[in-house]
Image: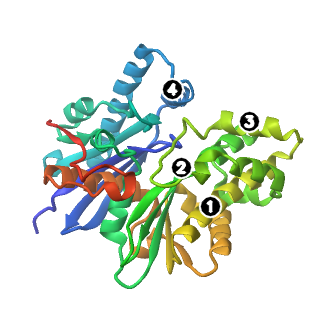
Amino acid sequence: MAEPAYYIGLISGTSIDGIDCALVSFDAERPTLHSYLSYPFPAPLRQQLFALCQQPDTSLRALGEAHIAVGQQFAAAVNALLEREQIDSRLVQAIGSHGQTVFHKPARPLPFSLQIGDPSTIAFLTGITTVADFRAKDLAAGGEGAPLAPLFHRAVFASPDQARVIVNLGGIANISVIAEGREFLGYDTGPANVLMDYWIDKNLHQSVDLQGQWASSGQVNDSLLELLLDDPYFAAPEPKSTGREAFNGRWLEQRLAALGQDLAPADVQATLLELTATIVATEIENQLAADQVYVCGGGAHNTALMQRLAQLLPDSEVNSTGQLGIPPDWVEAMTFAWLARQRLAGIAQDTPAITGASRPVILGGVYLA
């Protein structure tokens, strides 16, 4: 049997917890995930990336060096996966690299979204044509530039019989509303793991609240929750997108200071989990009565968060995308493998429905090996 035509998807998300690398093939539009790898950043580079996100007025030298360093790490992830699976790089049609977002500002008149991870470096070090810079054309067409995962969600998760919402719980949460007979929508709802990760790292020196155990040990503080929910982003209409430049540790600390109460750290964590669950559930209920809600991203493993979403959405089935055959950790990386394939085929994407762009556009620039 002939080898399939492979594509590789690469992304490091808002949580900056490593590089997701997925090896994918396609039968028509239906993807098959053949293999995957989570490739950690070296600790100094990870700290450098956090600093770039938190200090947007950084030096050009620091930004340029990080751009190349991230590209080298992305290439290393690809090469490690292919070596482990003993797959010849010539069998890979293209790499789709989202890169690492360090700043996202879709506001006019000069919108931009900056993802680092030099695609020329990736193409050269892997010997594989690389598609990158997926957001720029949409921004040029008047769109938000993000989120783009809803395009993939619709292509692979749509059902003719069920009204579905796909929820991505990464550092930032986004939802995709997919139902027959109504407008397709997808947008960022606000923070998911980014604040919880910050808070547990600050207090317990852990990178993640496994299964939401620490949050479950605390009590939701209604006054803090009300203060957090008062951010204008949550009331803004879609299309909308956001990132770490808006929701970060500084954002949280300012609101804790404004609250003027000495809260137990676990209570803050419980409130942050409630914030994420509340904004996601509220947006879903505002859009439609969803038969099914499927969750992807790291938050799908947060048992407490999944349980709270189910409580807030009693009329919907709440599961992970694993129930649909795609593991929740790899949906985003697979998105960019799919987008690379779409780019090479010259297919314009229906971004106006999710980003507000003036017309469909072909996403991504091609960097030949």
Identity of the amino acid at label 1?
Asn
> From the viewer's perspective, is residue 253 above or below residue 214?
above
How many neighbours does mark 1 have within 10 angstroms: few (below 14), some (14-19), or many (20 or more)? Answer: some
Q: Are marks 3 and 2 in contact (CB under 8 Å)?
A: no
x then y, percent, for residue 294:
49, 70
Picture colour scheme: rainbow
Residue 172 circle label: 2
| Alpha carbon distance from label 3 to label 1 | 23 Å
How many neighbours does mark 2 have within 10 angstroms: few (below 14), some (14-19), or many (20 or more)? Answer: many
Identity of the amino acid at label 2?
Ile
Q: Residue furthest left?
A: 2
User: Which label's residue is closer to the chain start, 3 or 1?
Assistant: 3
Identity of the amino acid at label 4?
Leu
Q: Is residue 206 left or right of residue 360?
A: right
Q: Nearer the viewer, mark 4 or mark 1?
A: 4
Identified at 44% across, 37% down, the residue is 107
Asked where in the image residue 35 lies, by quadrant, the reply is bottom left
User: Which label's residue is closer to the chain start, 3 or 2?
Assistant: 2
- Residue under label 3, please give it: 253
Identified at 29% across, 49% down, the residue is 358
SS for dot 2: strand
Closer to the camera in the image, 359 or 190: 359
Asked where in the image residue 109 lies, by quadrant, the reply is top left
Identity of the amino acid at label 3?
Glu
Q: Which quadrant holds the C terminus? A: top left
- Residue under label 1, please give it: 302
x then y, percent, for residue 117:
35, 32
- Residue under label 4, please give it: 52
Q: Are marks 4 and 1 in contact (CB under 8 Å)?
A: no
User: Which label's residue is closer to the chain start, 2 or 4?
Assistant: 4
| Alpha carbon distance from label 4 to label 1 | 28 Å
